[in-house]
Amino acid sequence: MTEQKKLDRKLSKFPRARLMTEVTPVERLDRLSDRLGIDLWLKRDDLTGLSFGGNKTRQLEFYFGEAVQQRADTVLITGAVQSNFVRTAAAAAARLGMKSVLQLEERVPGMGEQYYHSGNVLLAKILGAEHMRFPVGEDEVGADNALHERAAQLVAAGHRPYVIHLGIDHPPLGALGYVQGGAELSAQISDFDAAVVPSGSGSTHGGFLTGLRLSGMPAPVYGICVRRNQKQQNARMEKVLSKLADLMGFDPAIVMNDIDVWDGALAPGYGRVGEGTRDALNLMARTEGIFLDPVYSAKTFAGLIGLLDVGVIRKGQKVVMLHTGGLPALFGYQEVIGSV
């Protein structure tokens, strides 16, 4: 049995709601390759199809698979104000005939009015989502508890709610989407020297690394920290990968020694746009005509450039960067990046 068939069999155990339009393309960035002195490719998960695309669609296929299996009629989820996750969850709920409850955390201080009304917030309102507010940005357990309180109210009213948890102590179902994503990439391009992905909740990074390793791909996967520093993110990744190994039934040693996270592009913090992030966003747009979002993909590209500058990624190497989408957030950040 091939590695791909073994992986397909592992993933087939989990219910899945098909939300992806199709396999997302991989394309070479010719002008940036010449400029940076590497062979640069982009995995276009900004083109997943549902509600402006983005990487969260892969993760939500498995959460909604379980929700459908449980005959849920309402899905509850937490994210930052301009979260792509909650916007995509609202779209998935609409497609599957469910209601959505979106709890928005205050993670990014000092933002203007557009941040609270444009971008993903506007799209979620068009999708008919119910909104809640949570005043703390670093209390995952508290945020989950607040969702369960609302879920209890829904049960009392005769509904069947399904909670997508924020906290790390729950099974990382969303990471399964990127196990599939890593396997998908390995079938598209098999000779790259390194992959670069954002590392936030750990689901995308952990799933992608696992998918590549279970497909027999040895290239390093560099996770660019978008929310926590390197030490904190490394500890989170260990926990995510351990839980993912338990969930899927594979030896965690396959991935544990391959955790590579880098926080050189993180400043000034989650959801905040520093000079390097702004420069990376502009460079991609003005060289290749491709937009990045200010929270994840622009920081990821800034991290790739940083790794090249410090010699972790070397000149001439073939590098694949994961474009995680999130483009509606650009409009919520107009006051921050619109003057450049």
Image: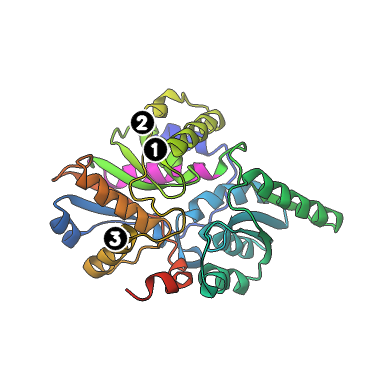
- Which circle, 3 or 2, is nearer the viewer? 3
Q: Is tag 2's residue or tag 1's residue first in the polypeptide sequence?
A: 1
* Left or right: 65 as drawn, with respect to 130: left
Secondary structure under the numbered disc 3 in the rendered image: helix
Contact between labelled residues 2 and 3, with CB atoms less than 8 Å apart? no
Q: Main secondary structure of the magenta part?
A: helix
Q: How is the image coloured?
A: rainbow
Percent x, y of residue 328: 46, 68
Q: Identify the residue under disc 3.
A: 280
Asked whether 337 falls inside the magenta stretch, the response is no
- Sort mark 2 into few (<14), some (14-19) or many (20+) by Cα contacts within 10 Å: some
Contact between labelled residues 1 and 2, with CB atoms less than 8 Å apart? yes
Which residues, given as a range, are shown in magenta?
Answer: 174-191
* Left or right: 302 as drawn, with respect to 77: left
Residue 232 in view (yes/no): yes
In space, the residues marked 2 and 1 are separated at their CA atoms by 8 Å
Q: Residue at x 36, y 55 (%)?
A: 299
Q: Amino acid at mark 2?
A: Asp
Residue 44 in view (yes/no): no
Secondary structure under the numbered disc 2 in the rendered image: loop
Q: Is tag 3's residue or tag 1's residue first in the polypeptide sequence?
A: 1
Asked if residue 332 is positioned above or below residue 253 in the image, the reply reads below
* Left or right: 15 as drawn, with respect to 184: right
* Left or right: 142 as drawn, with respect to 220: right
Q: Is tag 3's residue or tag 2's residue first in the polypeptide sequence?
A: 2
Percent x, y of residue 64: 61, 51
- Sort mark 3 into few (<14), some (14-19) or many (20+) by Cα contacts within 10 Å: many
